[in-house]
Amino acid sequence: MTPDLIEKMARAICELRIREIRRFDRTPEEIERQLSASVDYAWGGWVPEATTALSVALDAIGEECARVAGEVIVQARMGEIDNDLRSIYHIQADEIRARIAELKRALPLTK
């Protein structure tokens, strides 16, 4: 997980929260004018939420990749595709999970 990705997610969450708070007391034009400076000032406070969101997303991606690999294995067992692919896809699912685990270990909240 790169710091840039965490910063982008934190900025997006921060911007969303600022928009929610300010929508009642400012016009959309005023919000747009002030938003950039506000996000630049406050995005660092949203790093924990961004890290959590990215961690959850990576888990979901890993499970989906593993599910697809599992479906391919079932198809191979049923003779719908070449049986040699079974081991390839099984290895791929394990590799995807391992890579996602590495990415998650790099997140600030998982240290």
Image (spheres, rainbow, N blue to C red):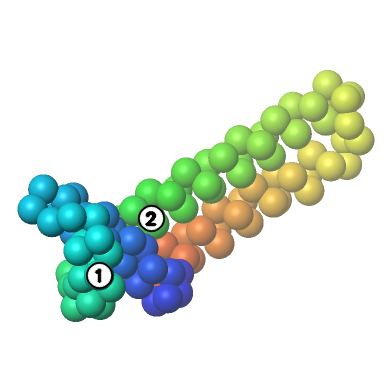
Of all residues shown, which one is farthest toward the left? 25
Residue nearest the observer in this picture, 15 or 76: 15
In depth, the one of 47 and 94 nearer the eye is 47
Numbered badge on residue 93: none
Residue drawn at 33 percent across, 61 percent down = 12
- Dot 2 lies on which element? helix
Q: How many marks?
A: 2
Residue located at (20% from left, 63% from top): 30
- Between 16 and 23, the one nearer to me in the picture: 23
Residue to which mark 1 is pinned: 33
Q: Residue at x 79, y 39 (%)?
A: 86
Please tell me which of labels 1 and 2 falls first in the chain: 1
User: Looking at the image, is 92 positioned above or below residue 86?
Assistant: below
Compared across the picture, whether 66 is left or right of 83 comes to left
Residue 49 lies, in percent from the top left, at 25, 58
Q: Position of residue 66 (x, y in %)?
A: 60, 41
Q: Is residue 90 left or right of residue 102?
A: right
User: Residue drawn 11% across and 48% down?
Assistant: 24
Residue flagged by tag 2: what amino acid is it? Ser
Residue 79 locus on image (x, y percent) = 89, 24
Where residue 110 sits, quadrant-wise, is bottom left
The quadrant in which the N terminus is found is bottom left
Q: CA distance from mark 1 to mark 2?
A: 32 Å
Helix, strand or loop under label 1: helix
Residue ID for mark 2: 55
Instruction: Tell me residue 93's x, y (percent).
Output: 64, 47
